[in-house]
Amino acid sequence: MTARKPTTQSKAASKLPSSKPATSTTDTQDTEPTPVAEPVVETSLRGATSAIVAVDESSFVPTPTEPVVETPPVKTALSAKTPTPKQVQLNTPLKRTTPPDPSNLLNIVKDGLSTYVDGMQPNRILTEQQGARFQLGLWNTIKTVLCIEGPLFYAAMDLLLECIDQNSDTVFGGRYVYRHMDSVPISNDDRRALERMLNLLTLTAKRSTRGASLKLVDLGGTAESLRNGPQGQRLISYYSE
């Protein structure tokens, strides 16, 4: 198979530079064309890129940058120094209170009775508040006697009854012993207990007639009015001997 001769036009075209290599018809038909990057397209792309770059550079306006302001460090006010709490020593031994001296208890009873006898004399003019204060002191003295335990309780009861017997015609007489009782600042239960105790003590104060007088009072009811089991039992045991 013979190749065709190129025409004059083909000859003229062959003189011009071509970006593609000349291929024969036979090569075109027998073999597949090899893909080659087109320089024209590449040139146009480069040109476009150059143009874009040129436009960007010409239209670029520098943006003014804001000055960086440094924030000064905040000075915190120093807090007042708090005193360091003292540590408590756990191994510190506790202070123990010694029991009261028995003789001191008897002196307390004596002082309480003397104050009442001197302050409540019939010839003295007392206000309602003053009389109520003396009656309250007598009630506290009686409760002190009832709180004493052991043999000392019997000695305190003897002292109390002896004082009442010696002053049975004055402050512990029937006309004077219940004065200002309604004004004493105690509860109704305590006032009832105080009145029952005074009734028992004044009737049984004389030793010679104590047995006969005891039959006139309700010893069990008086002990119950105290609302204290041990004190009531001590009171009953004293009159049982």
Image (cartoon, grey):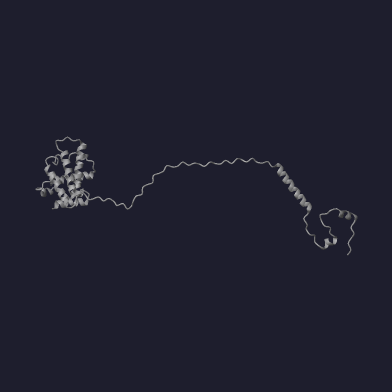
The residue closer to the viewer here, 229 or 159, is 159
The residue closer to the viewer here, 13 or 216, is 13
Position of 61 relative to 89 (above/below)? above
The furthest residue to the top: 125
Task: Pick the quarter of the image with the N terminus.
Answer: bottom right
Q: In terms of image quadrants, where is residue 172?
A: top left
Q: Tell me residue 164's x, y (percent).
A: 13, 44
Q: Tell me residue 142's x, y (percent).
A: 18, 46
Please indicate, yes or no, whether residue 137 appears anywhere in the rendered image.
yes
What is the tally of numbered marks visible in this picture? 0
Q: Tell me residue 144's x, y (percent).
A: 20, 47
The furthest residue to the left: 208
| In the displayed structure image, the side of residue 17 where residue 131 appears, left or right | left
| In the displayed structure image, the side of residue 74 where residue 160 appears, left or right | left
The residue closer to the viewer here, 221 or 17, is 17
The furthest residue to the bottom: 1
Residue at screen point 71% across, 44% down: 57
| In the displayed structure image, the side of residue 66 where residue 178 appears, left or right | left
Please indicate, yes or no, whether residue 215 appears anywhere in the rendered image.
no
Q: Tell me residue 174's x, y (percent).
A: 14, 41
